[in-house]
Amino acid sequence: MVKNNILWSVALAAVFFFVMFSPWTAPYVNFWYTMTATAIILTSISLYSCRETIKELSNHSMKAWLWWILGGFLIAFVLWWAFWIGDKVSAWLFGFARPQVELIYGMKSGTSPVVIALLLLFIIGPGEELFWRAFLQRRLMQRWGKNMGFIAATACYTLVHIWSFNFMLVMAALVAGCCWGFLYRLSPRLLPALIISHAVWDVCAFILFPI
């Protein structure tokens, strides 16, 4: 039963990401609203399938949440600088790198930056951590062990971005997925900090301080 839940959930995520990113479907949908709907659906699956996650998040004290917030901002800060350095190095090594990055930022056109920031901060960023880490990686680590579960979940998170046919976006998903996934592999109790870091990093990288 658990195996089936994992398979159909990942398949559903792959379909949503195909609709958002593929050149055959992307021109006909609003990326940000589709991403928001995807995050809401995947979050619902996660919370329904992993009720222990809700219990864990609600059991943290105010003092613990202050540490999670601080840790989340620190992770986002380090990750932003890692991407900034990676952008400069990749642009120096590969002529296609910067144009592909510009294509990623081109997805902002047609939607208010304020709307995008709010969706990233409160729905998309948290939703991705709840699905890819709290649901998928947790279940895979329970089945296959911490290391294989981390590798498999990160691979799934990376591969669903392949529909964009954008090498830089796929690599960005790999790097970010490895970062958040490895921290979750070290301790699932870090989930609140990962949720905050994902949301904050999204807003910084896409809206406040584009790379």
Image: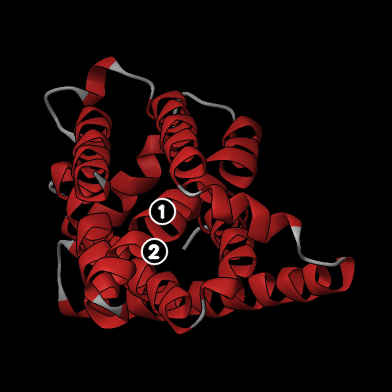
Residue at 21% in and 57% down: 156
Task: Give the amino acid type for the residue marked by disc 1 in the picture.
Answer: Phe
The percent coordinates of residue 122 (x first, y second) are 64, 42
Secondary structure under badge 2?
Answer: helix
- Residue 143 or 20: which is nearer the viewer? 143
Q: Is residue 157 left or right of residue 95?
A: right
Q: Residue furthest right?
A: 62
CB atoms of marks 1 and 2 within 8 Å = yes
Residue at 37% in and 29% down: 31
The percent coordinates of residue 73 (x first, y second) are 68, 71
The percent coordinates of residue 167 (x first, y second) are 16, 59
Q: Quadrant of residue 59?
A: bottom right
Quadrant of image for the N terminus: top left
Q: Quadrant of residue 201?
A: bottom right
Crowdedness near tag 2: few (<14), some (14–19) or many (≥20) residues, C-alpha within 10 Å: many
Residue at 18% in and 44% down: 7
- Residue 181 or 170: which is nearer the viewer? 181
Secondary structure under badge 1?
Answer: helix
The percent coordinates of residue 205 (x first, y second) are 52, 58
- Residue 211 or 22: which is nearer the viewer? 22
- Residue 205 or 126: which is nearer the viewer? 126
- Judge whether residue 14 can be spotted in this image: yes
For residue 135, which numbered disc appears in the image? 1
Q: CA distance from mark 1 to mark 2?
A: 5 Å
Q: Which residue is mark 2?
A: 138
Q: Residue furthest front?
A: 1
Q: Is residue 30 left or right of residue 165?
A: right
Q: Is residue 115 left or right of residue 66?
A: left
24 versus 5 height, above or below: above
Crowdedness near tag 1: few (<14), some (14–19) or many (≥20) residues, C-alpha within 10 Å: many
Task: Give the amino acid type for the residue marked by disc 2 in the picture.
Answer: Arg
